[in-house]
Amino acid sequence: MPLGAHLVGSVPLPNAEQVLRTVGRELGSRLRRIPDGETGPRADWIVWQYPVLSSRSQFEVAPPTPYAYRALPRLRLRPGERGDDIAFEQLGYAEAALSSFRTFSVVKRDGELPGGCRFQVSLPTPLAPISAFVSLGDQPVVERAYEAAIALEVERIVADVPHDQLAIQWDTNVEFGMLEGDVPAWFPDVEAGIVERLVRLGRLVPPDVELGFHFCLGHDETRPRHVPVDLGRMVEIANALATGMDRPLGWLHMPVPTQQHDDRPGDREETEVSEAVEEQTRPCKLCARPRWVNVAVAAASEQWRLRPANFFPGAWKWIARRHDANDDAPAAAVS
């Protein structure tokens, strides 16, 4: 079975044009969508949003916390500030996306990208910069303002980019840190609060624009941050999205460890993927970060084949089994 490739966002090249031309040349027809590489000031994911937040006069700085995404001063409301007047004019995501889409159009016109390839815009969920940079007690009011601002960014993107050329991905990272207890959450029912937010974000994207979610463990310079025992929580969230959205999902992108062992307990059971979920989430991407699978493909390496098993809430295990050249059963679907 021919394998596709899904790039979650960042590509270590100098600018969008080099990313688009290089990736188009190297991956060619394997691509169904392509990001601009998040180059320049966006290279460190959400860090470029810190000055967007810190420029608001309502904030003062406090010491960073141990779970901070980067060792930057924490932002908190000044004494006497309620925060209900915080507003963000522009976050910069729409401006960057529209600039890169112009480059994408030129590269595609030049025949260096497949005709059916869409331009992928990868956006962080509002919880990411808010939980990373804002003091816990002030996060509720600031999150509301930031979510309103990112909704306007999406509105501008979908207004200016032809829908048949566009794909939008929500990068979902700190949510899984919250579920693992690594990152504090200000709302009481963490899983329900996360699902509610992700469904709300997904509904910002028109049905004729491809929509996907990148489930991410996060990472520092050497290792993933929020490493779960298994990916059960991710699959629970995936199922909730598949059943809770009033539109299909183009892809789900999940991290799968590269170091699996045949003797892991409980990894031998296989069941069929739930039809409702399969129809909503196909193709499913398997991904991730340093020391995890780096590009989302069906086989994590030449030695491993990944199988979905018990893909429904409350009863999930991920099957990683040795690749057998004589085994014709399909691996997880990819683009």
Image: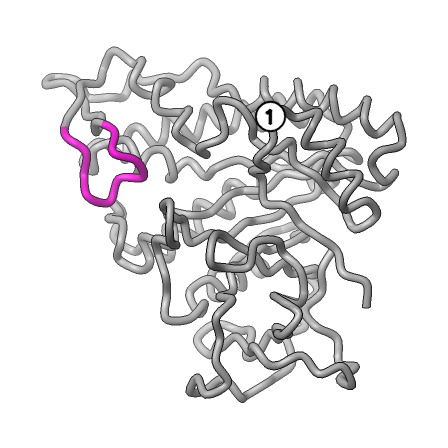
Which quadrant would residue 26 be assigned to in this image?
Answer: top right
Mark 1, residue position: 14
Is-magenta flag for residue 69?
Answer: yes
Give the extent of the magenta segment: 63-72
Q: Is residue 276 visible?
A: no
Q: Is residue 99 above or below residue 176?
A: above
Give the main secondary structure of the magenta stretch: loop
Q: Is residue 19 above or below residue 55?
A: below
Task: Please give left or right for residue 333 compared with residue 129 in the image.
Answer: right
What residue lies at 56% left-to-right and 27% top-to-bottom?
39
What residue lies at 31% left-to-right and 13% top-to-bottom?
55
Q: How is the image coloured?
A: one colour
Instruction: Indicate the position of residue 178 as horizontal and vertical percent values.
Output: 31, 53
The front one of 134 and 249 is: 134
Q: Is residue 189 above or below residue 67?
A: below
The front one of 82 and 272 is: 272
The front one of 205 and 284 is: 284
Instruction: Indicate the position of residue 139 as horizontal and vertical percent values.
Output: 26, 34
Q: Is residue 227 above or below residue 79?
A: below
